[in-house]
């Protein structure tokens, strides 16, 4: 597992707060890896539309807080399962509110 994010080391305390401080992290403010993995820049609706506001409210009510932002805040996220340099599975978010099934992405069916 590794995190790639569009900011800089500012996000490190946020990641550590979830017990993931030892997970490798790549700062990609230029968006090089985002472009290489085909992750698009979002529209205003994809970044701040009603679904995103609902998900944000759910997160706040669950005790999560907004961390520092940095880099290209319009870049949509994605989740990838890689092996030997090949993408085995990919999930490219259509908006910032989506939460993929991480366990399903990690499973390798025969």
Image (cartoon, grey):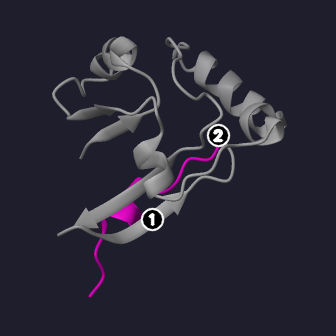
Q: Secondary structure at mark 1?
A: strand
Position of 47 with respect to 36 (left or right) is right
Task: Return the disc, 1 or 2, that comes first in the chain's sequence.
Answer: 1
Identity of the residue drawn at 72% across and 35% down: 47
The residue tagged 2 is 96
> In the drawing, what numbered circle is on residue 72?
none
Q: Which residues are magenta?
A: 97-110
What x and y, as percent, mark residue 39?
A: 55, 52
Q: Residues within 10 Å of mark 2 (few under 14, many from 20)?
A: many
Residue in the image at 39% along x and 69% along y? 89
Q: Residue at x 83, y 39 (%)?
A: 45
Q: Is residue 109 magenta?
A: yes
Mark 2: which secondary structure? loop
86 w.r.t. 63: above or below: below
Q: Is residue 57 above or below residue 24?
A: above
Task: Give residue 68's position: percent from left, percent from top.
Answer: 50, 11
Q: Quadrant of residue 92?
A: bottom right
Residue 86: say if magenta. no
Decide which of 61, 43 is in the foreground and name it.
43
User: Label 1 belongs to which residue?
Assistant: 90
**Which quadrant does the C terminus fall into?**
bottom left
């Amino acid at each position: 597992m590794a995190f790639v994010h569009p900011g800089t080391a500012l996000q490190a305390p946020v990641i550590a707060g979830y017990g993931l401080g030892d997970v490798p992290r790549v700062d990609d403010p230029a968006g090089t890896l985002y472009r290489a993995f085909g992750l698009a820049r979002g529209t205003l609706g994809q970044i701040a539309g009603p679904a995103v506001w609902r998900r944000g409210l759910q997160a706040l009510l669950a005790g999560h807080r907004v961390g520092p932002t940095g880099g290209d805040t319009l870049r949509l996220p994605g989740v990838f399962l890689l092996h030997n340099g090949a993408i085995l599975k990919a999930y490219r978010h259509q908006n910032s509110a989506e939460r993929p099934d991480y366990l399903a992405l990690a499973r390798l069916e025969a």
